[in-house]
Image (spheres, rainbow, N blue to C red):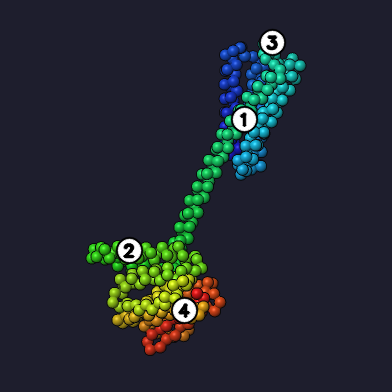
Amino acid sequence: MDTRKRMAVQALLWGGYVAVSLAMVSSFQPLNASFVFVMVCVGGGLWAASEGLRALALRRAWLDRSPPALLLRLALLPPLFALAVQAMLFAINWAGISLGLLHFPPNVPQGWLVLLSYTVNTTIMLWLWMAVWMGLQMLHRWRVGEVAKWQAEAAARELELQVLRAQINPHFLFNALNNLRALINEDPARAREMLSRLSNTLRHTLQHSAKERVPLADELAVVRDYIALEQLHHEERLRVDWQVDPATASASVPPMLLQLLVENAIKHGIARTAGGGVVDIRIGRDGGKLNIAVDNPGQWKPGSTDSTGLGLANLRERLARAGGNGAGCRIAAADGRVNVTVELNA
């Protein structure tokens, strides 16, 4: 709320308080100009005190403090401000009466007990005002926090989509969706299975792409799903031979490492070879090293980027970041087949 609106609300609030107070007094005794003047001064004093408490609470960050510290400030400071307001009114009354400017009926109560009761009443009004103001402040903070939360969630979803676009071959996704659409009428049960595999592949990409390492077992599971989806597209042209050493069960690898190798083998090998062929996947240990080899039909020339694609460039970047000392990637070609071997710390 800007300053102009706040001042308007304050004027309405304390002006209403003065009007109600005058109405209550008039039910017991006639009003005169002195009563009205003093009550206007009361309203002005409460206005000034509430603004002072607000400024102090903001400057000292009361709402950021612990509940005991906040309660201590609320217990002490509003009574002090109320006492200051009553001291000001006492001075105004004394000066006005001494100068003959203010005139009150002789039956108007006076004395220290009256001053104390007025101070208590003023304190209660300031406590009520602080309760409402702090409640509105907390509500505003909650709303701002919710908006920030929604914005952060939207940004996170956008980032996830960017990661997904960067990691998943768009042609693979396009082909998978088209194949699923065709399969729904032909074999609904298999279509549901393939949809689950696609979901697993995308979920793995979103959840693990930012990590440095994931369990090899998780990587193997998602690659099996990926291959099943590719076989839906390439059918009998894509065959896979797995050779995984059980001793590698506890190993971990950079996320998407094996999938990048297999994707590259299918894209640049199977898809470009008449009749397709077999992709050999061999995973084993050599001392403290983990060896992953993917072999596929195709041709490769040293220095050529067309036959390896961006996938292997991403692979080398992942190995440099999370493969450990001595991690590397070798490419070899012989007898119409291309072999990519990755070595990294297990």
The image shows residue 315 at horizontal and vertical percentages of: 48, 74
The image shows residue 335 at horizontal and vertical percentages of: 38, 89
Q: Earlier in the sequence, mark 2 or mark 1?
A: 1
Q: Height in image: 13 above or below 152?
A: above
Asked whether, in this view, residue 85 is left or right of residue 294, the answer is right
Residue in the foreground of this view, choosing between 331 and 32: 331
The span from disc 3 to disc 1 (Cα, nearest Å) is: 30 Å
Give the number of the disc on residue 228: none
Q: Is disc 3 in contact with disc 1, using a CB cutoff of under 8 Å?
A: no
Q: Which residue is mark 3?
A: 106
The span from disc 4 to disc 1 (Cα, nearest Å) is: 75 Å
Residue at the (64%, 33%) spot, across then down: 75
Q: Which residue is mark 2?
A: 195
Q: Earlier in the sequence, mark 4 or mark 1?
A: 1
Q: Please, what is the three-letter code of the amino acid marked with disc 4?
A: Arg
Residue in the foreground of this view, choosing between 297 and 212: 212
Mark 4 lies on a secondary structure that is strand
Q: Is disc 2 in contact with disc 3, using a CB cutoff of under 8 Å?
A: no
Q: Which residue is mark 1?
A: 126
Q: Earlier in the sequence, mark 2 or mark 3?
A: 3
Q: Height in image: 11 above or below 236?
A: above
Q: Please, what is the three-letter code of the amino acid marked with disc 3?
A: Pro
The image shows residue 82 at horizontal and vertical percentages of: 67, 28
Q: Height in image: 60 above or below 326?
A: above
Q: Which residue is mark 4?
A: 285
For mark 4, does the 10 Å Cα neighbourhood hold few (<14), some (14 to 19), or many (20 or more) residues? Answer: some
